[in-house]
Image: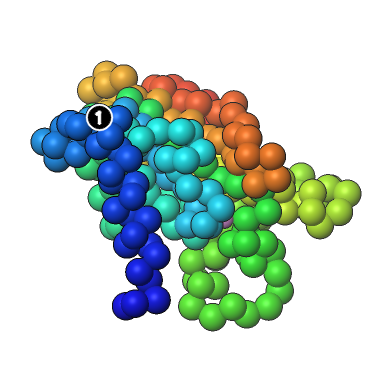
Amino acid sequence: MSELKHLLESNRQWAAERLATNPQFFSGLSQQQTPEYLWIGCSDSRVPANQIIDLPPGEVFVHRNIANVVVHTDLNCLSVVQYAVEVLKVKHIIVCGHYGCGGVQAAMENKEHGLIDNWLQHIRDVYRYYRAEIDACADNNEKLDRLCEKNVIQQVLNVCGSTVIQNAWANNEALSVHGWIYSIKDGLLRDLGISMSQVDDYRAANR
Ligand code: CO
C-alpha cells in the first residue's frame, strides 16, 4: 500500500484545489449528475475522456474497453448506454477511437494473444467488411489508421442499432450518436462525419 502513497497524496491535493476554487464543488456533485454526453472510448491510458475534451467531473458519462467496441451481447456496455439514455438523458453519445490503437493492431496480426483474441474478433469482422478499402492502403501504418476509423464507424452503427437508441428515436427524443477519432501524436480529435440523430440516418448508413 505504501508504494501508492503518492497517488493518495495527489488526490488530497487535487480535492483541496477544487475546493479552493469552488467550496460547493463536491457537495453539488454528490447531489446529482446531469451529464449531456456519453463517451464510449478505448481503455488506452493515453486517451482519457475528461481530459481530452477538458470537462470536469459530472459532465461526461464514460464507458471504456479495449478498442472501443460496442457488442450487442455485452451487458456491461449496453447497461451503460441504457442508463445514460433513459435515466441520465444524455443528448450525445460519442464513440471515440484513436489512431495507433493496440487492440486494432492486434486484431490485424496473425498471431495469438490469448483470451483477448475473442474480443478482437469483433474488429476482425470490421476488417472483413472493409477489406478492399483497407488492403488498398499504401503501408501497414495507413492500414491500421484506416481500420481504426472503420472500427469507430462500425461501433457507431452498433450503438444506433441497439434497442435503447432505436426506442429513444421512436419516442422522438433528441439524441445524436457521433464518431470521432483521436490522435495521440497531436492531441486532437477528428470528427469522422457520421453523426446520426434519427432512425432514417441509421437506415441510410446501414443499407
Ligand atoms: Co486503443
Position of 88 with respect to 17 (left or right) is left
Q: Label 1, on which residue?
A: 22
Q: Position of residue 48 (x, y in %)?
A: 48, 48
Residue displayed at 69% across by 39% down? 186
Q: Position of residue 94 (x, y in %)?
A: 45, 35
In front of the other: 43 or 120: 43
Q: Quadrant of residue 172?
A: top left
From where the camera sits, is residue 157 visible?
Answer: no
Residue displayed at 48% across by 57% down? 43
From where the camera sits, is residue 56 visible?
Answer: yes
**Vertical placement of residue 173 versus 67, above or below:** above
Q: Looking at numbered disc 1 in the image, what kind of residue is underneath it?
A: Asn
Classify mark 1: helix, strand or loop: loop
Figure quadrant of the C terminus: top right
Position of 167 with respect to 107 (left or right) is left
In front of the other: 130 or 47: 47
In front of the other: 133 or 8: 8
Position of 60 with respect to 189 (left or right) is left
Q: Position of residue 75 (x, y in %)?
A: 29, 57
Residue displayed at 79% across by 54% down? 141
Q: Quadrant of ligand 1?
A: bottom right
Q: Position of residue 184 (x, y in %)?
A: 65, 47
